[in-house]
Image (spheres, rainbow, N blue to C red):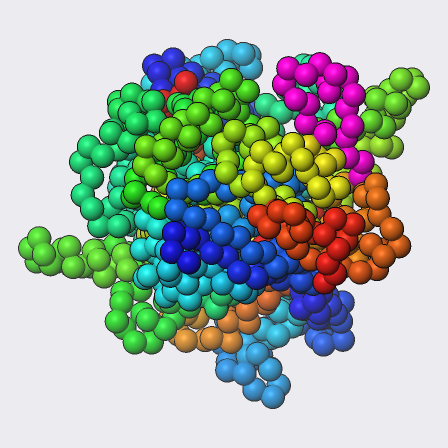
Amino acid sequence: MTGLVLLALFGGIALAAPLIADRSELLVEAGRYNANLARPSLKFLLGTDEVGRSVLAQLVWGARVSLFIGLFATCVAIVIGSTIGLASGYMKGRIGTLLLAIDDFFLVIPFLPLAIVLAVLLGRSPLIMAFVIGLTSWAGVARLVRAQVLSLSERGYVDRARSLGASRRYIMVHHILPGTMPIIIANATLVVPIAILTESTLSFLGFGDRLSPSWGRLLEGAQSSGSITLNAWWYYLPPGLCIIGVVMAFTLFGRALERVFDPRLAGR
Amino acid sequence: MSGTLLQIRDLHITYRSIDGDVPAVRGVDLDIAAGETVGVAGESGCGKSTIATALLRLLPSSAKVTGSITLDGKDVLALNPGQLRAVRWAGASIVFQGAQHVLNPVHRIDRQINEAIEAHGAASETKAGVLLESVGLKAIRGNDYPHELSGGQKQRVMIAMALACDPLLIIADEPTTALDVMVQAQILDLLDEIKQERGLSMLLITHDLSVLTHNTDRVMMMYAGRIVEEGGAAELMSGSRHPYTKALVKSFPIIGDMASRFNPTGLAGDPPDPAELPSGCAFHPRCAIATDECRVTDVALAALADDASRRVACIHVSGRLL
Amino acid sequence: MSIAFVLKKLLTAVQTLFAVVVFNFFLFRIVDRDPLAKYKGRTKLSPAQRDVMIERMGLNGSKVEQFVAYVKSVVQLDLGRSFDSTRPVVREITDRLPATLLLVGTSTLLTVVIGVAIGARAGWKRGGRFDKVSTASTMVLYSTPEFFFGMLLLAFLAGKTGWFPTGGLHEIGGSDGFFGSVLDTSRHLFLPVITLTLGYLGSYVLIMRTSMLETLSEDYLTTARAKGLRDRDVMRRHAMPNALLPSVSAIAIGFGFVVGGAITTETVFSYPGLGLATSNAISNTDLPMLQALFLFSSASVILFNLAADLLTAVIDPRIRRAR
């Protein structure tokens, strides 16, 4: 599957970052003696940015940041989403309805403005960014999990466990959760691309750590340094293409997983 | 033969799929004369509905159809798209099972009826209303949407729509399934009435044998894609010869006969999976009189010695092997 | 569809809106203990000025008092003053709203028309060449951050070739006459509109295609063919209307989301709308602006959700004339 191959490629690059370029190249000082916005050359394979730093170095190290934020944010979203989805699906009564209402509410709120507001209020480090992105993406997961839980709890073994005296929490964790795992996993791989895109958008808008540039940050740098009109394509093309590549890789992989876990979708 | 409206010869229909070919119809011959009503009965999966859909070439492209279907002198399978569209509804029309979504939920009734008429060129100002009245509905119901009608009313609409282009043949595919018993009787009477008024031929497909007793001239029993018995309706029902027909007739209680209700003699087992047909005679696993020969050799329809209009596909009855 | 139905939907919308207001309040007042710490006005605040600001922003009193005051001010459409420009926030929003509506309206129109056409055809002839090509292309579109399109378009169609202006909405020197200004505005709109359209095209194509695929298995299509209709007419008259129904809802809701500001696109093109305002508010940590913009975009999503519900009820005869 193409997706997997691409993923391996990007993952490999991210891990191999220290081998390709030294971390110190990311510091602003590193660029002091280099030409600014220089074209690609043998020394700088992807040219330099507006303060003379190697674009390639930033790209390669940026892979780590972008992937980390994307994956971490997805974990946050999945954990929150599954918990709420599980609880709202299984617990009838007031708790369940309340959780459903919260879920509905978060589905209505536009996620980008919310992410912006949270990021402004909470801070700009990559970790916080990941949290913020996770906080804005959990609602879809919750909805999906809830639907699955509802259909699973109709099945016989749940009633049997209840009649044997199992507590609600026990049933939720030991019987229902395993049943939802396939859907959660398949959905998780599709949340990652959204998280990565959101990260790139937030970074583009100025969030994120200046010292650990992500791909979105690179694009922001390209935009604000005027490299577009100056035709410094080596600055903005590589990060953009990388984003497209990684997002597509995860999407392809996620769709393939979906087809495996939910045969009804196989014909699409 | 003059007077024969529909002539099907050696019809084979196979569904192609990734997992292999599935034979739905395995060599069927069928004739319908002008003004005649022929019933095709059998359990689900025997291929009867497939024949109905194939008659107007409405099967999906994954279905392979061979043989010949001659309607009013035209070879349906050889028509080009334009000719096919002309024959559809004007040569033969279909009354589908009304329970499913056979009517477009977002179009009004009269629009759907008029659409058929317009597709064949004629203008249609009030014809929809007239057709609705002829099936016992008020013309004003034409303004309604399908979801505003009951099951029986929808079926009447289907019949009205089927008459829109004055067809020669009406194919009624399970017209009474999913209707209440009272409504079933009404619909069958309606079909009868229309048939006689207009001199139409009808192909009546059903799994409910009680429908066939007073509405049809001749009946064909189908099993696993083949016709296993055919003959006049009354004789076939009261004096069935094929083991399958006998068992099936017995399992339908006769209305009014209390004894039959208390002695259900159903047919054990399920119809065979078309993808995995039994060897030899397809019916042998469920047959009360199956012998070793039945398990091995396939059997063909053959006329009875004493009655040429009756044909049976059983070694023990007509003795002809494939 | 009865008055009761409409009222019920309206009530739900108002309830959700209120929840958003509450949420907004909590977010800004409780998460951020001292909002004035982020005030980066032109001069440093003296203690006296600070007190005045606190009073004006309603930051004194208990949380409950603050909340009531906040709700009152929202209802009166007084959303404070921008930290940056010190003009009332509501004015800032209304100044920029038309530009964003123009951009978002035009591009949504394009996206819907093109997306529906492509999606319908791709779904109708599923697995065919058109389907494969369009699905692959939309996947690439979907995976691209929309501002990247903007950057590419800027680079090739504006920077290098100078065919289109690199930003803004009007030429600085003004333009002559009505036609002159229409032409000028169009030239400035062109690239941002294309950017936004490309950015959202993917999801509309997908929605329509899925919708069409679900319609394909319906029996009334067989009835339509049996009646002797051409394939083209079966698609247009029977499949499309039914496939469009669920899409209308999705489309209206999508519009609601985008109105919140095509933030990144406006930033790339320095387009003077709500998106650019958001971008600036971020850079300047202009809290009142951000709070108001968040409220505004949530409100527009709720509004368009409501519109979508009502529109579907009107269009779908099964709801309109429910038994």
- Residue C46 picture quarter: top left
Q: Which picture quadrant has residue B180?
A: top right
Q: Residue at x 72, y 76 (%)?
A: A20
Residue visible at 77% across and 24% down?
A: B264
Q: Nearer the viewer, residue C180 or A30?
A: C180
The N terminus of chain A - image quarter: bottom right
Task: Note whether C88 is above or below A187 in the view shown.
Answer: above
Q: Examine the structure image and report whether residue A258 is included in the region drawn in magenta.
A: no
Q: Is residue B291 visible?
A: yes
As drawn, B44 above or below B254 = below
**Is residue C61 or residue A212 the one in the foreground?**
A212
Residue in the picture at 54% in, 12% down: C64
Q: Report x, y in % for residue B164.
A: 30, 39
Residue A197: image quadrant is bottom right
Q: Is residue C94 visible?
A: no
Residue B253 belongs to magenta span: yes
Q: Position of residue C222 (x, y in %)?
A: 45, 47
Q: Is residue C184 left or right of residue C154?
A: left
The residue stretch that appears in magenta:
B250-269
